[in-house]
């Protein structure tokens, strides 16, 4: 499959916006930040649900999140969790896109995807790398609030992005 340059530029813009949001979000508990970069990754997956775009987007998102993380061992965790999360969200999107309202689906997938991403991140950070803090405490204090915040952000941002896309030539390439 040949990758469209215009789509790659749009995905780059989404990642750039997500990176800025990720960098400026303040640390919450144990030095972890809310992962706003995920929202932009999910928007990219929703707009261009093709495996090559999803994989490229997730690898770049993971790399940028790894560079900007403040969590001990978060570099490895981000590089692993973003592609795995993207594949799960992509599979869920493909399985449900014909039967679900796109705006509702965007919010549901964002919540599920954020929980999956946070769980993988914490597992790697706590179990594999031996970072401090309990899984349940971090999951409750960081992952669940981030999932709620990301879902609210997706509920607000996705319809706006859809409207903008409907006015461009990229709308034929977007799902």
Image (cartoon, rainbow, N blue to C red):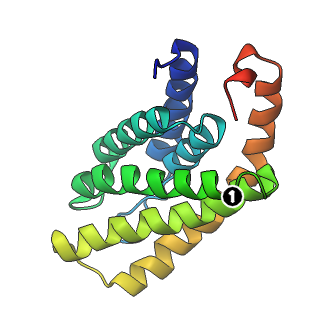
Dividing the picture into quadrants, the one containing residue 50 is top right
Evaluate whether residue 152 shows in this view: no
Crowding around mark 1 (Cα neighbors within 10 Å: few <14, some 14 to 19, many 20+) is: few
Q: Please report the residue visible at 59 percent of the width from the left and 39 percent of the height from the top.
A: 49
Count how many numbered circles sit on residues in the image. Answer: 1
Residue position for label 1: 96
89 on left or right of 83: right
Estimate the x, y position of residue 97 in percent, counting from the top left.
71, 52
Looking at this view, is 172 or 132 the one in front?
Answer: 172
| Residue 83 visible at all | yes
SS under mark 1: helix
Residue name at image x 36 percent, y 67 percent: 120
- Is 140 placed left or right of 148 in the picture? left
Question: Is residue 129 left or right of 151 when viewed as pictured?
Answer: left
Residue 124, x across and y down, in percent: 25, 68
User: Is residue 93 rendered to the left or right of residue 54?
Assistant: right
* Residue, far left: 129
Q: Quadrant of the C terminus?
A: top right
Residue 168, how many percent across, how many down?
Answer: 77, 17
Q: Residue at x 40, y 71 (%)?
A: 119
Image location (x, y in percent) of residue 115: 51, 69
Front in this rendered view, residue 28 or 104:
104
Nearer-the-camera pick, 123 or 138:
123
Residue 22 vertical placement versus 30 (above, below): above
- Residue at image point 49% right, 81% down: 140
């Amino acid at each position: 499959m040949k990758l469209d340059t215009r789509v790659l530029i749009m995905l780059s813009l989404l990642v750039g916006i997500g990176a800025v949001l990720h960098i400026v979000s303040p640390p919450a508990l144990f030095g972890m930040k809310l992962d706003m970069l995920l929202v932009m990754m999910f928007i990219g997956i929703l707009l261009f649900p093709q495996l090559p775009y999803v994989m490229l987007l997730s690898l770049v998102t993971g790399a940028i999140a790894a560079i900007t993380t403040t969590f001990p061992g978060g570099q490895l965790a981000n590089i692993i969790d973003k592609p795995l999360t993207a594949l799960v969200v992509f599979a869920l999107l493909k399985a449900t896109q014909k039967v679900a309202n796109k705006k509702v689906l965007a919010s549901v997938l964002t919540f599920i995807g954020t929980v999956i991403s946070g769980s993988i991140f914490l597992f790697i950070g706590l179990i594999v790398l031996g970072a401090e803090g309990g899984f349940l405490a971090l999951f409750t204090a960081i992952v669940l609030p981030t999932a709620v915040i990301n879902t609210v952000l997706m509920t607000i941002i996705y319809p706006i992005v859809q409207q903008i896309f409907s006015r461009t030539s990229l709308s034929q390439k977007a799902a």
